[in-house]
Amino acid sequence: MSEAVGGGPETGAEPVSAVRPFLLTEGRVVGEEQALPMETQLVATPEALAQLAQPHLAFERRAIIETCRVPVSLAELAARLGLHLNVVRVLVGDLHTRRMLTVHVPRAAGSSDLDILRRVIDGLRAIHTSGGPGHG
Amino acid sequence: MAFAQSTRPADPAMADAGATTTAPRPPQPVKMVVSGGFGVGKTTAIASVSEIEPLTTEAAITEVAAGIDDVSMTPRKTTTTVAMDFGCLTLDPTLKLYIFGTPGQDRFGFMWKDVTAGALGALVVVDSRRLDDCFPAVDYFERDGTPFAIAVNAFDGVLSHSLPAVRSALDVAPEVPVVAFDARSGDSVRESLIVVLEHALTRARGF
């Protein structure tokens, strides 16, 4: 997605229909308090994968399950499917309720979690000293 | 509402352990934020450290985030969409770092809570020729308590103002790190992220 590197959010917002994306969710939205963090990890359950063979699954739901064969973040899922983040939040909620997705919410401690801070520092240092993955 | 309390268990590590025993175990996700003004090099910085090509996710309008129940009934509301770039970096099989860019414009401040909630820290990228552009980011992180560092992007390897001059102009607290970096260099961006995390660590120990 070279477009993202070149322009990305810097290109600004474009007007879109406020209604259309939410047809998928039948008009439902997720309130701020219930919103899953964007880095939440999602994995399809074996039950969901078994249902992929059946024709009754709606396209978007099928696409979500396909994408979540391996652990995927909520943000990644939205980006790959080209759906609004909050639309995906609603659809993921539905699939979770139907036990088709497992939802792994990140720890809430964030910047006060000493153990995590140390592990991330060590992880970044390890990449640095090994010469890095070769990015510019 | 679709998300019942069951999606937020008391111990997130145990989230949905009962739903399946054979699905792949995801890594623990952690998050950092790259912020700053328009066109200052945020996306370049994310691309420099990400193991994937940065992805763009479209976030919905503010009214939706605020929990209005039926979008179709609020035609007078703003109908903008806003794109956020992000990348990720697998630190080990159990730990994955996500790096989110905040939307470039001030008027999308409403999205910042979504981006910054639970973040380990933030890197505020600064173009020293346009210092004013980073004030909204600095103000935001000072207010919400996210640990942050200032990274002055050296365009073409040259800083147009010295770091002490930038610090003085931004008037940030003495403990806030101010460093020079090159958004195009993975090593440089990683070092800057480490500066943020060490600052967070110092603060977390002190509180």
Image (cartoon, rainbow, N blue to C red):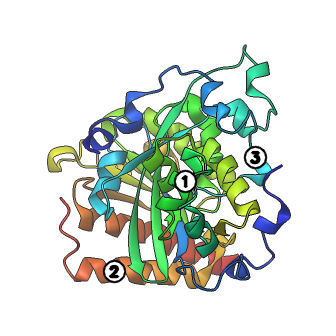
Q: Earlier in the sequence, mark 3 or mark 2?
A: 3
Q: Quadrant of residue B99?
A: bottom left
Estimate the spatial distance between the alpha carbons at disc 2 and disc 1, rounded to whole Å: 39 Å
Residue that appears at 57% across and 52% down: A55
Estimate the spatial distance between the alpha carbons at disc 1 and disc 3, rounded to whole Å: 26 Å
Kindly report which numbered mark, 1 or 3, lies closer to the viewer in this rendering: 1
**Quick one: SS at disc 3?**
helix
Q: Which mark is residue A62?
A: 1
In the picture, the quarter occupied by the N terminus of chain A is top left
Q: Position of residue A62 (x, y in %)?
A: 55, 53
Establish if B39 lies above or below A102: above
Mark 1 belongs to chain: A
- What amino acid is labelled 2 in the image? Arg
Rate crowding at label 3 as few (under 14), some (14 to 19) or many (20 or more) other CA atoms within 10 Å: some
Number of labels in the image equals 3
Q: Earlier in the sequence, mark 1 or mark 3?
A: 3
Q: Relative to the observer, which residue lies in front, B1 or B84?
A: B1
Q: Quadrant of residue A125?
A: bottom left
Q: Which residue is disc 2 drawn over?
A: A125
**Quick one: SS at disc 1?**
helix
- What amino acid is labelled 1 in the image? Arg
Q: Position of residue A57 (x, y in %)?
A: 61, 51
Kindly report which numbered mark, 3 or 2, lies closer to the viewer in this rendering: 3
Q: Which residue is disc 3 drawn over?
A: A32
Residue B187 relative to residue B175: left or right: left
Q: Are marks 3 and 2 on the same chain?
A: yes
Residue that appears at 39% across and 81% down: A123
Residue that appears at 22% across and 54% down: B184
Establish if B133 lies above or below B170: above
Mark 3 belongs to chain: A
Residue A88 appears in the picture as rendered: yes
